[in-house]
C-alpha cells in the first residue's frame, strides 16, 4: 500500500476536515507521496454564481479559499511532499472517486463528519458512498481529532493496531497491510475474529452449541497459525470472541487502547455486503477517538 502512494484529501472547510488534512499531509511527508487537496462545489451553487458574478468565479474563489485553508491548517508545505489543489463540481462522492481513479490515488483521507447545515458533506452520505465504491484504501479520521503536526506524532498515538478478520481469502492481504503498518510505527498487532452465535428457531437445540464451538476452534487455529508467521517484534496476538461483530470490535478497541483499526470492505460472512453494516457501525461507534483504515477488495479476490 505504501509504494507509489498517492493521496486525495477531500475537505469542506470544516474543523473535522482540517484534522483529516493534517493526517494526509503527515502521511504524504513520511512516504514522499503527492497529496491532492480537493473540494467539491454544488452544481446548483455553481450555476447561481455563474449568473450572478460570472462564469468560473466560484471555482476561482474556492481555489483561493482552499489554499488559504491549507496554509492556516498546515502552516505551509513541509519539505519533501508535493501538494496540489483541485476544485470541481458535482456529487461529492462521485467526484472523489473519479479523481482518485483517474489520478491513480491509492489512499483517500477524509473525516467521519464534515460541516453542518446546508454545507454538511460527510458521514452518512459522502463517506459512506465512498466506502461502498472505492478501489483505494480510505483512512477515516475522527471528527474531534485535530490531526498530527508530524507523522511521528500520529504514530505515537497508535499503541496498537486492531484487525477485525474473517476467514475469507482476503484475510492474509488484510493482515499483511496491517502488520506492515504496525511494524513501521512500532505498534502492537491484535487480530480479532467475532463468531456470531448461530440463530435457530428450535430453543436449546444441541447442534447450535456444537456449531458455535467448532467455528470458534477453527478460527482460533487459523489465527494462531497466522500469528506464528509474523515477526516476533510485532507482539501480535489473536482473539476470538462471541457476539455482535460491530459491538465486540468497538469494545475490544476501547478496552485495548487501540489507535487504528484496519478493516476490510470485501463481502464476507463477517462484513456482509460490500461496506456492510459492520464497518459502518464500527466507524459510527468509534468516530470520536479511533482512526479506521478501510481496505477495498483486491481485484482477484473480488471476482
Image (cartoon, rainbow, N blue to C red):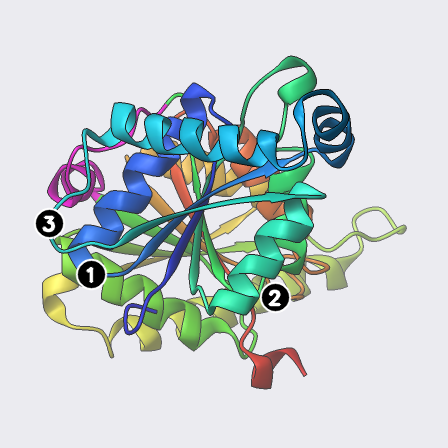
Q: Residue at x 20, y 39 (%)?
A: 154
Q: On the image, numbered disc 1 is attached to which residue?
A: 31
Q: Is residue 111 left or right of residue 257?
A: right
Q: Is residue 77 left or right of residue 170?
A: left
Judge by depth and name the residue closer to the eye, 135 or 196.
Answer: 135
Q: What residue is at 58 percent from the left and 67 percent from the top?
A: 215
| Residue that carries the numbered disc 2 in the rendered image | 266
Q: Earlier in the sequence, mark 1 or mark 3?
A: 1
Question: Mark 3 = which residue?
Answer: 79
The answer to whether mark 1 and mark 3 are in CB contact below 8 A is no
Residue 39 % position (x, y): 53, 38
Residue 147 lies, in percent from the top left, at 28, 31
Residue 296 visible in the current orientation: no
Magenta-colored stretch includes residue 149: yes
Mark 1 against mark 3, which lies toward the viewer? 3
Quadrant including the C terminus: bottom right
Is residue 266 visible in the rendered image? The answer is yes
| Secondary structure state at the residue bearing disc 1 | helix
Around disc 1, counting alpha carbons within 10 Å, would you say few (fewer than 14), some (14 to 19), or many (20 or more)?
Answer: some
Indicate whether 264 appears above or below 49: below
In this rendering, is residue 248 above or below 79?
above
SS class, disc 2? loop
Q: Residues within 10 Å of mark 3 (few under 14, many from 20)?
A: few
Magenta segment boundaries in residue numbering: 145-159
Q: Looking at the figure, which quarter contains the N terminus? A: bottom left
Amino acid at each position: 500500500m505504501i509504494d507509489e502512494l498517492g493521496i486525495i484529501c477531500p475537505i469542506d472547510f470544516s474543523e473535522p476536515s482540517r484534522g483529516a488534512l493534517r493526517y494526509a499531509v503527515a502521511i504524504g511527508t513520511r512516504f514522499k507521496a503527492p497529496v491532492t487537496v480537493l473540494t467539491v462545489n454544488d452544481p446548483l451553487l455553481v450555476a447561481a454564481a455563474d449568473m450572478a458574478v460570472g462564469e468560473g468565479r466560484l471555482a476561482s474563489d474556492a481555489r483561493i479559499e482552499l489554499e488559504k485553508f491549507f496554509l492556516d491548517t498546515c502552516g505551509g508545505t513541509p519539505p519533501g511532499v508535493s501538494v496540489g489543489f483541485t476544485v470541481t463540481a458535482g456529487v461529492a462522492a462521485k467526484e472523489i472517486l473519479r479523481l482518485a481513479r483517474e489520478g491513480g490515488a491509492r489512499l483517500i483521507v477524509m473525516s467521519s463528519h464534515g460541516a453542518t447545515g446546508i454545507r454538511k458533506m460527510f458521514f452518512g452520505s459522502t463517506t459512506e458512498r465512498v466506502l461502498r465504491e472505492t478501489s483505494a484504501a480510505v483512512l477515516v479520521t475522527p471528527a474531534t481529532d485535530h490531526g498530527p503536526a508530524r507523522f511521528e506524532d500520529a504514530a505515537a498515538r497508535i499503541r496498537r493496531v486492531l484487525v477485525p478478520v474473517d476467514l475469507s481469502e482476503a484475510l492474509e492481504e488484510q493482515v499483511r497491510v496491517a502488520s506492515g503498518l504496525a511494524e513501521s510505527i512500532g505498534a502492537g498487532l491484535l487480530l480479532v475474529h467475532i463468531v456470531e452465535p448461530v440463530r435457530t428457531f428450535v430453543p436449546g437445540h444441541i447442534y447450535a452449541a456444537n456449531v458455535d464451538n467448532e467455528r470458534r476452534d477453527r478460527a482460533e487455529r487459523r489465527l494462531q497459525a497466522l500469528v506464528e508467521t509474523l515477526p516476533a517484534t510485532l507482539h501480535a496476538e489473536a482473539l476470538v470472541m462471541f457476539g455482535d461483530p460491530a459491538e465486540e470490535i468497538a469494545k475490544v478497541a476501547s478496552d485495548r487502547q487501540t489507535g487504528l483499526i484496519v478493516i476490510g470492505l470485501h463481502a464476507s460472512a463477517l462484513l456482509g455486503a460490500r461496506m456492510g453494516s459492520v464497518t459502518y457501525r464500527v466507524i459510527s461507534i468509534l468516530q470520536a477517538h479511533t482512526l479506521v483504515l478501510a481496505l477495498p477488495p483486491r481485484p482477484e479476490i473480488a471476482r
